[in-house]
Amino acid sequence: LLEFTSTRYIRLRFQRIRTLNADLMMLAHRDPNEIDPIVTRRYYYSVKDISVGGMCICFGHAKACPLNPATNRSSCACEHNTCGESCDRCCPGFNQRLWQAGTFLIKHECEACNCHGKAEECYYNQTVADRKQSLNIHGEYLGGGVCINCTQNTAGFNCETCIDG
C-alpha cells in the first residue's frame, strides 16, 4: 500500500476536448460545410482547481521530514533507532529484532544487540531468532542479533564466551 501511494511525477490527462462553441455549432448546423473550420480547430482546456499534497514515506518511524538545504531534498528525521533516507533499516548495533514498518499503534522500534560491550555492530539472523539463540538486552532469548567482531578474546552470538587460550 505504501508503494501504491508513492508518487514522483503527476500527469494531467484531459479527456474531454472542448472547442470554442463547436459542440453547439454541430447541433445548430445540419450541413458539415456550414461549420467554420477555424472555430472547430481551436481547442481549449480549463482547469478550475488542482490540489496536490505530499509527505515523506518514513514507514512510521519519523514525525518530521525537514528539507536539507544542501541537497534541496526532504528526508526523514528517523526515530526508533532506524536509519536511512526513509527510515527503512535498523541503525548499526540495533539489529536484535528484524526491521518492521511502524504503525499508529505499534512503533516496532529497532532494539540494540546485547554484545556485553564487546562489539559495536551486529546483524539480524532469522535462523538464530527461530532457534532462540540470541540474548536480548532484557536477558531473554528473543530476537536474532549476532554480534560482529567481538573484542577482548570473546566469541558467540552475544560475545558471551571466552576464546580458548
Image: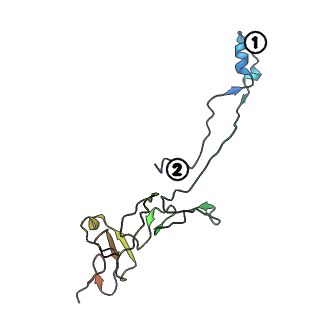
Residue holding disc 2:
6
Which residue is at a point 75% across and 12% down the rendered structure image?
Answer: 34
Q: Nearer the viewer, mark 1 or mark 2?
A: 2
Choose between 44 and 79: the one closer to the eye: 79
How many numbered badges does the structure rendering display?
A: 2
**Mark 2: secondary structure:** loop
Which residue is at a point 70% across and 37% down the rendered structure image?
Answer: 48
Vertical placement of residue 164 versus 32, above or below = below
Q: Quadrant of the C terminus?
A: bottom left
* Gap in angstroms between the C-alphas marked 1 and 2: 50 Å
State which tag comes first along the sequence, 1 or 2.
Answer: 2
Please state the horizontal and vertical placement of residue 116, each as a whole percent of the image.
34, 82
Q: Which quarter of the picture shows residue 157?
A: bottom left
Vertical placement of residue 126 versus 12, above or below = below
Residue holding disc 1:
34
Choose between 14 and 41: the one closer to the eye: 14
Vertical placement of residue 161 versus 6, above or below = below
The kind of residue on which mark 1 rests is Glu
The kind of residue on which mark 2 rests is Ser
Please state the horizontal and vertical placement of residue 154, each as a whole percent of the image.
29, 84
Which residue is at a point 51% across and 48% down the rendered structure image?
Answer: 5
Q: Is residue 122 left or right of residue 56?
A: left
Q: Which quarter of the picture shows residue 18?
A: top right
Dot 2: few (<14), some (14–19), or many (≥20) neighbours within 10 Å? few
